[in-house]
Image (spheres, rainbow, N blue to C red):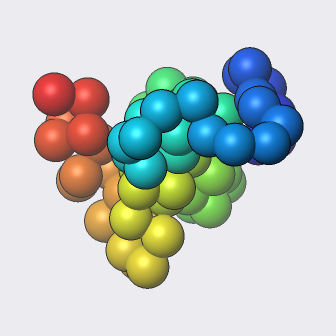
Amino acid sequence: NHFSAESYVGRPCSESWIEDQARGTLDIQCDPWMDWFHGGLQFQVEHHMFPRLPRYNLRKISPLVKS
């Protein structure tokens, strides 16, 4: 669900596109063997920051996003 965290209506709260994308979404931690079952949906923050990145690369980019 894209609305599991606080969301906004109207103008964005900040000037940062990345902050706005991360504010209304969250990730779910699971073991790598569960990736197929979730289909990449457990990496919502990564998906919103890099929407064209193939889902099999979302786990690889996750440490960079967290840092």
- Residue 58: x and y, percent? 37, 57
Query: Residue at point 53% right, 45% down?
Result: 21
Residue 25 visible somewhere in the drawing: no
**9 sits left or right of 24 in the view:** right
Point 53% across, 39% down: residue: 20
**Measured along the vertical axis of the image, is residue 19 above or below residue 18?**
above
Residue 9 x %, y %? 83, 37
Does 67 appear above or below 52? above
Q: Which quadrant would the C terminus be assigned to in this image?
A: top left
Q: Is residue 3 left or right of residue 56?
A: right
4 relative position to 49: left or right? right
* Observer-nearest of 33 and 51: 51
Judge whether 66 appears above or below 9 on screen: above
- From the top left corner, tell me how far across and down residue 14 is, in percent: 48, 33
Q: Quadrant of the N terminus?
A: top right
Pick the front one: 42 or 37: 42
In percent of width and height, residue 27 lies at 54, 32
The image shows residue 6, relative to residue 19, as above or below, that is: above
**Residue at coordinates 49% horizontally, 26% vertically from top-left?**
29
Tell me, yes or no, if residue 28 can be seen here.
Answer: yes
Residue name at image x 37 percent, y 74 percent = 53
